[in-house]
Image (cartoon, rainbow, N blue to C red):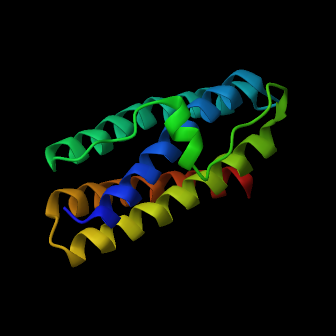
Amino acid sequence: MNKEITSALNGYIANIGVGYIKLHNLHWNVVGSQFKAVHEYLESLYDAFADVLDESAEILKICGEQPVASLKGYLAIATIKELADEKVDQKKALQLTLADLELLRDQAASIRALADKDDVFGIANLMEDHIANYAKQIWFLRSMLA
């Protein structure tokens, strides 16, 4: 498989890994009048991220490649940034989550394009599924922030 695809997918995996921890941070530290709804929504997102992380790493293994699999490895290549351990206003939590999901959607689209170009259909199909899910979650977040 093309090393560009492997590298791009590992960057995506790193962002999912860091995003997973970031969503936990937001879930635990969100405050505001809609605390319960936002707290539960963030939990649903990090639960979904666990599946995305697993699927993405496994598709690399299926293709005979090595996925990044450590926090140190994630932090070295992720473009999603960690947060401090402190209270986060619900609106800010949703804005941060929206920005990260938009980044992941765009990253998945880029990987899909690379995979399409090289006829790596398993990766292209997986990214299609992820893009569709991001689109739905982005819609939810934009609606919550309106």
Q: Residue at x 52, y 46 (%)?
A: 15
Q: Can you tell which quarter of the image residue 108 is in?
A: bottom left
Coordinates of residue 113 in the picture (x, y in percent): 32, 74
Q: Is residue 32 shown to the viewer in this render? A: no
Coordinates of residue 11 in the picture (x, y in percent): 46, 52
Q: Residue at x 33, y 41 (%)?
A: 67
Q: Residue furthest top?
A: 28
Coordinates of residue 91 in the picture (x, y in percent): 79, 44
Q: Is residue 18 shown to the viewer in this render? A: yes
Q: Is residue 113 above or below residue 80?
A: below
Q: Can you tell which quarter of the image residue 123 is in?
A: bottom left
In the image: residue 2, left or right of residue 97: left
Q: Residue furthest bottom?
A: 117
The quarter of the rendered structure image containing the C terminus is bottom right
Name the foreground residue: 113 vs 131: 113
Q: Residue at x 22, y 46 (%)?
A: 59
In the image: residue 50, left or right of residue 114: right
Q: Residue at x 31, y 67 (%)?
A: 112
Q: Is residue 60 above or below residue 48?
A: below
